[in-house]
Amino acid sequence: MYDRDTIELALLALEEGMTQVEAAELCGASRGAVQRWGRGLLPHARWRASGSAARPPRGAARMAPPDAEEDPLDEAERAAYEAAMNENMLLRAVLDDLKGAGSHPGSISNRRKCELGERLRAATGLPLREITAFLRISRSSYEYHRARLGRPDKYAGLRARVRELFDEGSRAWGYRTIWARLRREDVRVSEKVVRRLMREEGLSAAYNRRRRRGWSSYEGEVSAAPPNLVARDFSAAAPDELWVTDITEFRIPAGKAYLSAVVDCFDGRPAGWRIGASPTADLANGSLEDALAGRRPGARTVVHSDRGGHYRWPGWIALCEGAGLVRSMSAKGCSPDNAACEGFFGRLKNEFFHYRDWEGVSLAEFSGRLDAYLRYYCSGRIKRSLGWLSPDEYRASLGYAA
């Protein structure tokens, strides 16, 4: 869901004569969403009646306050009216400032907020306390950056590269990952500097903390359950010692997609995966077959799962027995027993899926993007626990074939 600032900016952009496509690009929203907002279909009806999204109608910024004889206002109502007029004026000034830059107000750094605030003070004559409140910057931060506006920025080049890396990481990388990426480019700078630059630029990795109840693969005790051999100890001394597996669901406007993954606990590398439109037995079996295709000869592998029906059916059991895999299973309804796989799906969704606009993306295109991301996860996604190497690089450094 888009935040209120995005919706307000889109509506003002349309009011100023921009096309839906231009407004969508300016705000970082989809054209369909902007079209709906333009028709008055806001996410919450109360936004049309109260709060900062309750903008005055077209031309209201040029209207004089109601005459006291025609429509008397008490002091509180007049103050609220003046506050709405001031906010409307500031929003229009911000829109004019951002039109050429193609920026979104939510991504403005504190330094740029200060630059913008100085222009707003000159253009509107409003006191500094109203400017800082509108821009959501503390007075101390504003004064800090204002004192440095005239000085050259010795980190200008580094600042630009940090922004580029943050965007390359789908705005999901924290300062440590970006610091490690810079070191791979032979840029020597401390973590503290990277953290400060990201804070000044307003670059904060987004994390989805809301847990949404999804579908359940449990179909009853259709066959005997093997014991829980893992007991929440997901450590492994070598590749193919311990695999964890599960299926997760993705919901996009075009429909639902399902990912079955087998993850190697040695380094978190997905050993095999399949993507499909239904959580079928073939999907689960196919991901296991892919993992077995890359398994080291002679490895004694434990494969751990939850109690979903896919892992209780004859096809899965036959695959495991035929390959010499040792089955392990979580307790009923106990997701922490399969925390390693749950964590893998959580990281994947946070970096690849959440906070993305999937409108207009077909299931086939989505599956292709997800497959490409999983390949990148193996070969390009660096991890602190692996010495800032990707799983494939880590295995190569130890003499294992990826």
Image: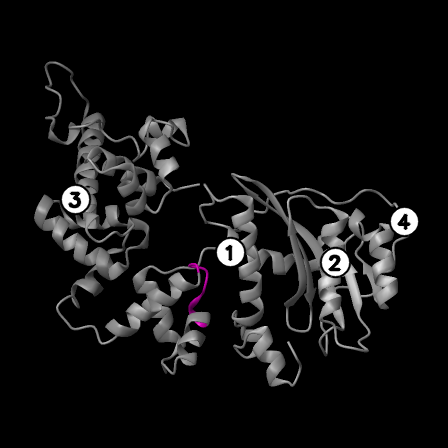
Q: As rendered, which of 108 and 185 lies closer to the eye?
A: 185
Return the residue at label 4.
223
Q: Distance between the residues labelled 3 and 1?
A: 34 Å
Question: What segment is highlighted magenta in the picture?
Answer: 170-176
Return the residue at label 2.
337
Labels 1 and 2: the sequence-earlier one: 2
The dominant secondary structure in magenta is loop
Rendered position, 367 above or below 256: below
Residue 308 is left or right of residue 185, and the answer is right
Residue 10 is left or right of residue 183, and the answer is left
The image's mark for residue 93 is: 3
Q: Is residue 129 magenta?
A: no
Q: Distance between the residues labelled 2 and 3?
A: 54 Å
Q: Where is residue 24 in the image (x, y as percent from the top left)?
A: 32, 42
Between tags 4 and 2, which lies in front?
4
Return the residue at label 1.
352
Determine contact: label 4, label 2, CB under 8 Å. no
Q: How far apart are marks 1 and 2 (CA)?
A: 25 Å
What's the amino acid at mark 2?
Asp
Residue at image position (20%, 57%) is 114
Q: How far apart are marks 3 and 4 (CA)?
A: 67 Å
